[in-house]
Image (spheres, rainbow, N blue to C red):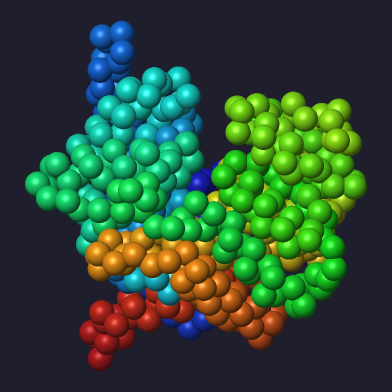
């Protein structure tokens, strides 16, 4: 990637979208910068009696349309720059789905795999102790992200409730069901992408049995594999952090899931059921109809985008395709269903959880799936129509769609034209 911050690279999408709308300069000025980014150092007692500190951040990017919303990731390479970029994306993702939220994000610079369970709980509670004045059910609502899960969210929600002196389940989403979590949250990211592909199948030229390659066989990757396989499609390649396996005739999904459930890599299934070992970096070049990047950012770059053979890229990860790679894929005629639409099922069901927490009434799984399907199809259709009407990529159309909503909200507070008249 070229020089500049991660947020600078993300803002390229904003600049492109602004070319296709008439928006006041105040709107762009407001969306170029994070509203607030808070840094803290979390000090916890380790199991051996020593004390250790960890850098942590929480960014509230923009709250024009409502309280900010976004996950907390535990990752050794997290930075403030990354957190602001992810919060920017969340701002647009919530606007894409027409949720009454702005965008936020949080992170702790830590490798959670090196912590004991007790140390992990202490770190999770320390995060809330540091940021309790910033978050809240009506101000900023965290959720799980990379290397965080429902139990961690449960610890965090409990710590916040203790600090404010009352049960406050709506402060955090992605909690265990027993602590106010929502049915359907576990597979929501993948299910939203599945509904989107199925709804736009005719427009995308997708018919019959489709071949699918999945980069990143974690939570979202495993769920999209299950959903697509149950719909009659063939999973031809999957990868995780240790490598990949492929089979032109279709991988044995049961073997793959069993391997992950037992803590093994997908590569441990090589030689079984027709599975062949594949270099993890080569997965993006596998012959398939749909490529599903569901790992980390910048997995499809200028150096490997030319190798992509898929007809459709379904972005279940955040920012898996760089802006330079986007241009390559567009020239090749590959349609990218962008992250701020394709993986927005997660934040949508998180919104459902927040609503249910506030109501004190919980919906059955069928209702959650139906509500999610309706929203994914409605916004997917609207974005597809924008792409065709303006002759732009689906990604640019998604940003145009979101920017129109953000601009309307920002302009409703008054702009230069209003105050100068």
| Relative side of 11 to 190, left or right | left
Residue displayed at 23% across by 42% down: 158
* Residue 414 seen from this side: yes
* Residue 286 seen from this side: no
| Relative side of 248 to 350, left or right | right
The relative height of residue 25 versus residue 152 in the rendered view (above or below) is below
The quarter holding residue 277 reads top right
Q: x, y percentage for residue 13? A: 55, 63
Front residue of 198/184: it is: 184
The quarter holding residue 108 reads top left
The quarter holding residue 338 reads bottom right
The relative height of residue 158 versus residue 67 in the rendered view (above or below) is above
Q: x, y percentage for residue 113? A: 47, 24
Residue displayed at 25% across by 17% down: 45
Q: x, y percentage for residue 220? A: 59, 49
Front residue of 68/261: it is: 261
The relative height of residue 357 versus residue 77 in the rendered view (above or below) is below
């Amino acid at each position: 990637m070229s020089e500049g911050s991660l947020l600078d690279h993300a803002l390229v999408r904003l600049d492109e979208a602004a070319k296709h709308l008439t928006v006041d300069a105040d709107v762009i000025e407001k969306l170029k910068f994070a509203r607030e980014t808070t840094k803290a150092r979390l000090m916890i007692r380790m199991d051996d009696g020593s004390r250790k500190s960890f850098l942590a951040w929480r960014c509230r990017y923009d709250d024009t349309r409502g309280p900010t919303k976004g996950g907390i990731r535990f990752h050794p390479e997290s930075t403030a720059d990354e957190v602001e970029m992810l919060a920017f994306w969340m701002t647009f993702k919530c606007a894409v789905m027409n949720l009454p939220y702005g965008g936020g994000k949080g992170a702790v610079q830590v490798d959670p795999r090196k912590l004991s369970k007790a140390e992990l709980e202490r770190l999770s509670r320390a995060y809330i102790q540091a940021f309790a004045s910033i978050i809240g059910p009506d101000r900023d609502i965290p959720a799980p992200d990379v290397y965080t899960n429902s139990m961690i969210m449960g610890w965090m929600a409990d710590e916040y409730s203790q600090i404010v002196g009352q049960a406050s389940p709506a402060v955090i989403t992605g909690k265990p069901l027993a602590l106010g979590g929502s049915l359907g949250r576990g597979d929501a990211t993948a299910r939203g992408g599945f509904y989107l592909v199925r709804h736009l199948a005719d427009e995308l030229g997708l018919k019959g049995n489709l071949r699918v390659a999945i980069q990143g066989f974690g939570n979202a990757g495993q769920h999209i594999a299950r959903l697509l396989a149950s719909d009659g499609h063939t999973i031809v390649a999957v990868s995780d952090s240790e490598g990949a396996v492929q089979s032109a005739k279709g991988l044995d999904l049961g073997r793959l899931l069993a391997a992950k459930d037992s803590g093994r890599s997908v590569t441990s299934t090589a030689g079984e059921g027709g599975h062949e070992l594949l270099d993890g970096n080569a997965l993006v070049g596998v012959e398939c109809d749909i490529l599903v990047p569901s790992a980390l950012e910048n997995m499809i770059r200028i150096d490997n985008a030319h190798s992509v053979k898929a007809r459709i890229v379904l972005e279940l990860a955040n920012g898996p395709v760089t802006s330079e790679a986007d241009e390559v894929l567009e020239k090749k005629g590959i349609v990218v269903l962008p992250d701020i639409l394709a993986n927005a099922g997660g934040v949508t069901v998180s919104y459902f959880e927040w609503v249910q927490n506030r109501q004190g009434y919980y919906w059955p799984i069928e209702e959650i799936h139906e509500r999610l399907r309706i929203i994914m199809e409605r916004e997917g259709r609207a974005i597809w129509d924008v792409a065709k009407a303006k002759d732009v990529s689906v990604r640019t159309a998604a940003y145009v769609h979101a920017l129109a909503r953000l601009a309307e909200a920002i302009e409703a507070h008054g702009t230069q034209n209003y105050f100068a008249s």
